[in-house]
Amino acid sequence: MDSSDITIRPAEKVDVKALQEIGRTTFTEAFGAVNSPENLQKYLDSKFSPEALAEEVANPDSMFFFAEHDGQVIGYLKINFGDAQTESMPEHTMEIERIYVLAKYYGKGVAKLLFDKAMSLARETNSVTVWLGVWEENPRAIKFYEKNGFVEFDKHSFILGEDVQTDILMKLTLA
Ligand SMILES: CC(C)(COP(=O)(O)OP(=O)(O)OC[C@H]1O[C@@H](n2cnc3c(N)ncnc32)[C@H](O)[C@@H]1OP(=O)(O)O)[C@@H](O)C(=O)NCCC(=O)NCCS
């Protein structure tokens, strides 16, 4: 597969079902084995219900994008501005809340295409800082963001079901 075979397009209201499917599948692939089935289920049910996703898609301060290959959704991106960000931030910041790719496409440049899309939107919206939270036990993602210029600046708690986990907050300041 060549990354020129991948298209990135906005995900909208009509895409909620597909978003639910890619969201649940990629989250389970990434974190299913290292969390209890009960906590995982709770998280999936609350965060990836059609109602919750429809609300997020409708939020004018959030944007979703799909990566597609041969008409199939193989990854997605969610970015937030303003009050949609998961932490309160100063003006002119953008959050990358989710970059998730199907496991069989890890290491093939799909995540980089989604990341590049996020960064071009950051520039278009005159964002000064791009930030994100990543689980401290997710070395692959941490390495991916470091490779792309992010540095740690803080930590916060992340609740998965009933498990309180620590996310590392990373940021990149745009020139
Ligand atoms: C995080 C993610 C988007 C990165 O995409 P990717 O295509 O796998 O990224 P890359 O292969 O370019 O980069 C990952 C880096 O981690 C390294 N890596 C691979 N497996 C690793 C592992 N088990 N532990 C540590 N590092 C690992 C790779 O070697 C690569 O670094 P390198 O280019 O210097 O060799 C993707 O893995 C993913 O969707 N993961 C599941 C969801 C997730 O964790 N999203 C982020 C939540 S904030």
Image (cartoon, helix red, strand yellow):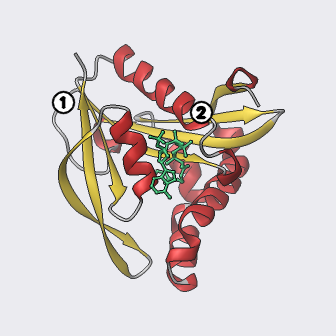
Give the residue drawn at x 58%, y 77%.
Answer: 41
- Frontmost residue, 151 versus 125: 151
Q: Residues within 10 Å of mark 2 (few under 14, many from 20)?
A: some
Instruction: Decide if residue 6 is on the left or right side of residue 117.
Output: right
Q: Residue at x 33, y 40 (%)?
A: 146
Q: Which residue is mark 2?
A: 109
Using the image as rendered, state which of residue 97 and residue 82 is in the foreground: 97
Give the left or right position of residue 22, taking residue 147 as reference: right
Q: Nearer the viewer, residue 138 or 128?
A: 138
Horizontal and vertical percent position of residue 48: 58, 61
Q: Quadrant of residue 80?
A: top left
Q: Quadrant of residue 20?
A: bottom right
Q: Residue furthest right?
A: 70
Q: Quadrant of the N terminus?
A: top right
**Which quarter of the image is occupied by the C terminus?**
top left
Residue at numbered disc 1:
91
Q: Is residue 140 above or below residue 174?
A: below
